[in-house]
Each structure stands twice: as C-alpha cells, then as structure tokens.
C-alpha cells in the first residue's frame, strides 16, 4: 500500500470513529434526558412556546389598538412566528423517543434528529429572525405612542393645585 492510500485510509477510520463518538454522545444525552430531547432542543421548545405566547397576544391585541403600517407588519410577523412555532413543535415531536428510558428508542430518536437536523436548524433561524423582527417592530411602535398623561396624584402634585 502506498503512503497516500494509507494516509487516506487512516483519515477515513478517524472520521468514522469521530462520527461514532458524536452519535454515542447524542444517544446518551437523549437516553438520560427526562424529556427525551437534547438540551438544545429542550431550550428551543421553551423559546418557541414563549414566542408563540407573545405572537398570540399580539394577534389578540390587534382589535384593541389603532391600525398603522407598523401594526400590520407586526401582525404579519406574529402570524409567521406562530406558524414557525407549530412547525418546531411538530419536528421536535417527530424526534422524540417512542419509549422513555429505552436504549433502542434513544438510538432511533438520535437518527431521526440527524435526519431532521437541517429542518430544525432552518426553523431555529426562522424563529430568531421573527423574534428580531418583532423586537424591532415593537420598539418602532412604542416610538409612535403618545406619552402618558400626567396623573393628578403623581408625586409632588397635590389635590389643591400645589397651594398649601
């Protein structure tokens, strides 16, 4: 065997070992998790739930606030975020192990995670983009709000108009 072929073979063996170790770590993480998910996916589900709650509140508040171009865009982004949150939950549910505390179920879940990795990454980026857009729109919207009226019982004001 010539030296270049031997080097190529050893690199392929090392690559195979590296992938095996990463897969084993993934299986162990899924197997030992109470939720049956990786920590990254658990936090993604929590963030998705939070964003879905915010988007739902913005959609419900649409009737209570005056319409402006910023409001319309905010509701459009909120609707897109809600759809992305549902998609995240759907993909994550597909990746969950079928049985809790089962090694073979954890192996199956790890392969489903590897299969759906690009979908999860894409949805995560979509949620981050939606969050950033909503943050910017809410910031822009609050600039258009009129300042609150002074309260008659505010500190320093008395009921007799300041006369004592």
Image: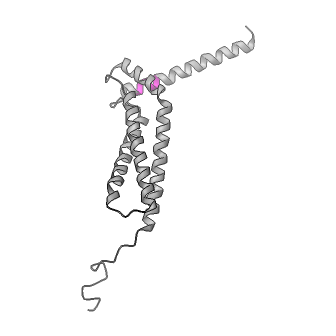
Classified by dominant secondary structure, the portion drawn in magenta counts as helix
Q: Please name the residue shown 38% across and 22% down the image.
A: 106
**Residue 91, horizontal then vertical, whole percent:** 41, 32
Viewer-nearest residue: 114 or 143: 143
Does residue 33 sit above or below 159 in this rendering?
above
Viewer-nearest residue: 64 or 34: 64
Does residue 102 sit above or below 131 in this rendering?
above
**Is residue 108 found inside the magenta-colored segment of the image?**
no
Q: Is residue 13 left or right of residue 24?
A: right
Task: Kindly indicate the quadrant of the structure image that contains residue 48.
Answer: top left
Stretch of the chain drawn in magenta: 24-29
Task: Kindly indicate the quadrant of the structure image that contains residue 82.
Answer: top left
Q: Is residue 11 left or right of residue 124?
A: right
Does residue 48 sit above or below 26 in this rendering?
below
Coloring scheme of the render? one colour
**Residue 33, horizontal then vertical, whole percent:** 36, 30
Does residue 93 sit above or below 158 in this rendering?
above
């Amino acid at each position: 065997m010539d030296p270049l072929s031997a080097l190529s073979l050893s690199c392929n063996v090392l690559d195979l070992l590296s992938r095996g170790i990463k897969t084993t770590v993934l299986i162990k993480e899924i197997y030992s998790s109470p939720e049956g998910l990786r920590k990254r996916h658990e936090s993604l589900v929590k963030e998705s739930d939070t964003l879905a709650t915010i988007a739902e509140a913005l959609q419900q508040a649409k009737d209570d606030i005056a319409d402006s171009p910023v409001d319309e865009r905010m509701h459009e982004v909120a609707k897109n975020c809600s759809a992305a949150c549902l998609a995240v939950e759907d993909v994550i549910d597909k990746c969950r192990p079928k049985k809790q505390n089962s090694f073979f179920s954890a192996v199956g879940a790890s392969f489903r995670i590897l299969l759906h990795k690009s979908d999860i990454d894409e949805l995560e980026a979509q949620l981050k983009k939606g969050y950033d857009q909503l943050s910017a729109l809410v910031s822009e919207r609050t600039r258009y709000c009129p300042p609150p009226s002074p309260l008659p019982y505010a500190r320093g004001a008395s009921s007799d108009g300041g006369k004592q």
